[in-house]
Amino acid sequence: MKIFRDLIFLMRGLMRADHRFFKSHGQYDFPQKKFGTSMNMYLVGSLMHNQKLKLQKWAIMLTATSLPST
């Protein structure tokens, strides 16, 4: 449980719902100083929640899966 909690804390920008749950239930009882990693995860999270980028990812994925295998 603690390993998952630590992972959620580091990736809180990407795993927003899990972070809200852990924060509201007081599960974070430790200091973390990995500022760069946290900022990178916030960047990745915001990119994944961007609607234009979601549509582009889906379009690429659909074209890649519809190609015949060689």
Image (tube, grey):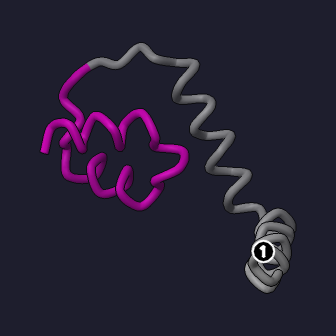
Snapshot quadrant of residue 13: top right
Q: Position of residue 43 (x, y in %)?
A: 68, 40
Decide which of 56, 41 is in the foreground and name it. Answer: 56
Q: Is residue 11 above or below residue 56?
A: above
Q: Position of residue 31 (x, y in %)?
A: 29, 18
Decide which of 57, 18 is in the foreground and name it. Answer: 57
For image coordinates 75% across by 78% down, the residue present is 69
Residue range of the region highlighted in magenta in the rendering: 1-30
Q: Is residue 16 left or right of residue 21?
A: right
How many numbered marks are there?
1
Q: Is residue 15 above or below residue 35?
A: below
Decide which of 61, 14 is in the foreground and name it. Answer: 61
Magenta span contains residue 16? yes
Q: Position of residue 28 (x, y in %)?
A: 23, 35
Q: Which residue, as the protein is rendered here, is positioned at the far top?
A: 33
Q: Which residue, as the protein is rendered here, is positioned at the far left?
A: 1
Q: Is residue 21 left or right of residue 64?
A: left
How many C-alpha atoms fall within 10 Å of the one at disc 1: few (<14), some, or many (≥20)? few
**Residue where numbered disc 1 is placed:** 70
For image coordinates 57% across by 38% down, the residue present is 41
Give the main secondary structure, helix, strand or loop, of the magenta stretch.
helix
Q: Is residue 64 left or right of residue 13?
A: right
Quarter holding the C terminus is bottom right
Magenta span contains residue 61? no
- What's the residue type where badge 1 is placed? Thr
For image coordinates 42% across by 33% down, the residue present is 10
Q: Is residue 52 left or right of residue 14?
A: right
Q: Position of residue 48 (x, y in %)?
A: 68, 58
Q: Is residue 7 above or below residue 45?
A: above
Badge 1 marks a residue whose secondary structure is loop
Quarter holding the N terminus is top left
